């Protein structure tokens, strides 16, 4: 029983990794609905592995390392590949200039900065009740959510029809991943309502956005998350 107790969270983490691998494969082949499902599974498993580890008091150094390695695929490789796919139709042309390489590879910069962010998070002891910079799951939901909504419903044609905007978005998100901007983490210091106003505002607003915009609202929620984090930034560390 001790073996199961000590490793249940790690099994969930490996499930996150497996789901991320499957999602990446289907993203490359153009089966975006399966990738979306895999991303949902990875998000759920990523939440519950930490929850289970804390509930069973089975936190370990191995679990910390496994979590980052799994996240690197599910929330590091996946958004980079998404931007890679988004830039693929433009070939080697940007703003009328022919480059000696295909510009789709610029999208993988997101993967590099996701790796850097995860490494920084592992050694930063301040990020217990808030994040510094955009966390990798939120970044993945934003990037893939935008792409999926456009592929399925042509919701963001203005964005995916312009390589320059996509590359600018790539650099902005890469910076946000390692920025010092404090953002909300869904971890509770206390159950007092006044201590959790930012989280309450975030959850209610997110539900309203998704209810109104449906699939297109999912990436909008991440933008809303960043705005709420900036507005309540002083309360995040108090």
Image (tube, rainbow, N blue to C red):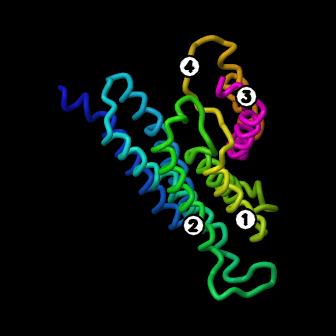
Q: Work out whether 28 lies above or below 51.
A: below
Residue 217 located within the stretch drawn in magenta: yes
Mark linked to residue 234: 3
Task: Tell which tag, 2 or 4, sits nearer the viewer.
Answer: 4
Q: CA distance from mark 1 to mark 3?
A: 31 Å
Whichever of callouts 1 and 3 sits on the residue coming sooner in the sequence is: 1
Whichever of callouts 3 and 4 sits on the residue coming sooner in the sequence is: 4
- Give how far across and how far down residue 186 sits, in percent: 58, 29
The residue at 81%/79% (across/down) is: 95
Q: Which residues are magenta?
A: 214-238
Mark linked to residue 189: 4
Q: Are marks 1 and 4 in contact (CB under 8 Å)?
A: no
- Give how far across and how far down residue 112 sits, in percent: 54, 62
Whichever of callouts 3 and 2 sits on the residue coming sooner in the sequence is: 2
Whichever of callouts 2 and 4 sits on the residue coming sooner in the sequence is: 2
Q: Few, some or many C-alpha atoms within 10 Å of disc 3 (few <14, some 14-19, many ≥20)? A: few
Q: CA distance from mark 3 to mark 2?
A: 33 Å
Image quarter for residue 210? top right
Which corner quadrant holds the C terminus? top right
Tag 2 residue: 108
Task: Tell which tag, 3 or 4, sits nearer the viewer.
Answer: 3
């Amino acid at each position: 029983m001790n073996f199961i107790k000590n490793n249940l969270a790690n099994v969930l983490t490996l499930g996150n990794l497996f789901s991320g691998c499957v999602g990446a494969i289907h993203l490359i082949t153009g089966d975006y609905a399966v990738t979306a499902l895999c991303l949902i599974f990875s998000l759920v498993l990523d939440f519950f592995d930490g929850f289970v580890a804390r509930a069973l008091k089975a936190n370990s150094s191995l679990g910390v390392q496994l979590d980052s390695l799994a996240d690197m695929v599910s929330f590091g490789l996946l958004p980079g590949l998404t931007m890679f796919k988004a830039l693929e139709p433009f070939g080697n042309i940007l703003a009328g200039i022919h480059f000696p390489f295909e510009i789709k590879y610029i999208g993988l910069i997101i993967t590099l900065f996701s790796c850097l962010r995860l490494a920084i998070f592992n050694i930063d002891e301040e990020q217990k009740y808030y994040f510094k910079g955009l966390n990798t799951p939120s970044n993945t939901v934003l990037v893939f959510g935008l792409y999926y909504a456009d592929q399925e419903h042509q919701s963001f044609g203005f964005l995916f029809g312009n390589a320059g905007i996509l590359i600018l978005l790539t650099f902005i998100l890469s910076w946000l991943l390692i920025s010092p901007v404090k953002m909300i983490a869904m971890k509770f210091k206390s159950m007092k309502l006044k201590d959790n106003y930012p989280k309450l505002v975030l959850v209610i607003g997110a539900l309203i956005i998704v209810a109104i915009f449906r699939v297109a609202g999912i990436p909008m929620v991440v933008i809303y998350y960043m705005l709420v984090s900036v507005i309540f930034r002083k309360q995040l560390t108090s």
